[in-house]
Image (cartoon, rainbow, N blue to C red):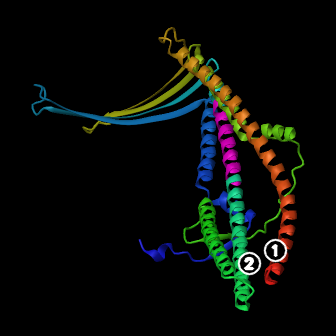
Amino acid sequence: TKPEEVQLLGAQPISLQQALELARRNSPQLQASRLGVERSQAVLRAAQAADYPTLGLNTRITNSGSYIFSNKPTSPFGQNFDTNSTGLTGGLQLNYNLFTSGGRSAAIQQAREQLRSDRLDFERLSEELRLNVSTSYYDLQQADENVRIQQSAVRNAQASLRDAQALEQAGVGTRFDVLTSQVQVAQATQNLANALSQQRISRRSLATLLNLPESVIITAADPVEIAGLWNLSQEQSIVQAYKNRAELEQLLAQRNIQQQQRRIELSQLGPQISLAATYNPSLSLSGNNNGSSLQNQDFFDQYTLSANLSLSLFDGGAARARARAAEANIAIAESNFASQRNQIRLEVEQAYSQLQSNFENVQTASVQLEQAREALRLARLRFQAGV
């Protein structure tokens, strides 16, 4: 709400490696993906629990009483009956699904494939974040170098303007040469202002990508240099992309998930066999409260063993319809796999061609830079000589 709350506190130079570490630590998308992996691990553990029987305990305590007043001829003052009983009952229940027509194993495998898919998604996001941070860092380096170049252009234009003014004062130069030099200074100053603006934008873009506080601005600490050479051929690069890109493995995991979903739906049409065992002990205490010493204690227990078989004879075709939907999802995943594979090949070919072109341009630009420096030196000498 106040300007001083969003004021920049200063610039902090960082290296590319530090930027990557900050991105991995601060990225909310990466943190959400990591939590998704933990969620899938919990879901897998819940699905694996179906391999074990379930055991439950229940107990109940009851207390009941009654009061009866009887007025019989043999008892002129009547007779009271006050009875009370307390009961304790409990039970143990053991259940186990012995046979589910493959539904249980399919559910476990589906949860396992979902965990694999989420881990691959975390890997994909990590690599995308690495690419985006690296690209933004290189853009900042380019913006810094462009500022340096434009600052040099301003200095050169100002030097030419001073030479033109000196020649005019000596009577060997013209007013047109001075005006031309002034225009060159103005153009160089404008280019420098644009370069400084792009530099500020590049710094803020990288800070935003690293999820840093808005009062912090960062600069590039690494020098501009060739990062390294790529020793693989284009064909080898394509094969490595097919092996390492998480997107392809993720689509295969999605296909496997739908295959297990199909098995789960079809298992509903098969027989289901379950085992159950119960044990129910109970204790009952009863007596009256009219002063007599009568007291009853009863204990008995009961157990049950059962095997249950169920078979769905008709469900209106719902299970098979859901299985066909899963089959359609399998075909969609395979189609997306082919499309993603083609896209990856295109990206690798484009990146490889650009890499080769950039490397050749670096060598050509180095030669052009030396030629431009020599041409500038000769032009400066000619200008100072009035030619």
Residue 97 appears in the rendering: no
The circle drawn on residue 261 is: none
Mark 1: secondary structure: helix
The circle drawn on residue 376 is: 1
Q: Residues within 10 Å of mark 2 (few under 14, many from 20)?
A: some
Quadrant position of residue 255 = top right
| Left or right: 233 as drawn, with respect to 280 | right
Q: Which residue is mark 2?
A: 156
How many marks on residues? 2
Query: Front-most of 190 and 145?
Result: 190
Counting residues from the start of the chain, the first of labels 2 and 1 encountered is 2
Looking at the figure, which quarter contains the N terminus? bottom left
The amino acid at mark 1 is Leu
Percent across and percent down for residue 350 are 76, 43
Query: Front-most of 347 and 207?
Result: 347
Residue 228, magenta (yes or no): no
Disc 2 to disc 1: CB gap under 8 Å: yes
Instruction: Name above or below for residue 258 compared with residue 123.
Output: above
| Left or right: 251 as drawn, with respect to 215 | right
Percent across and percent down for residue 324 are 58, 17
Q: Residue furthest top?
A: 313
| Left or right: 190 as drawn, with respect to 284 | right
Instruction: Name above or below for residue 315 compared with residue 109.
Output: above
Q: Residue at x 67, y 81 (%)?
A: 178
Q: Which residues are magenta?
A: 110-130
Mark 2: secondary structure: helix
Q: Residue at x 78, y 48 (%)?
A: 354
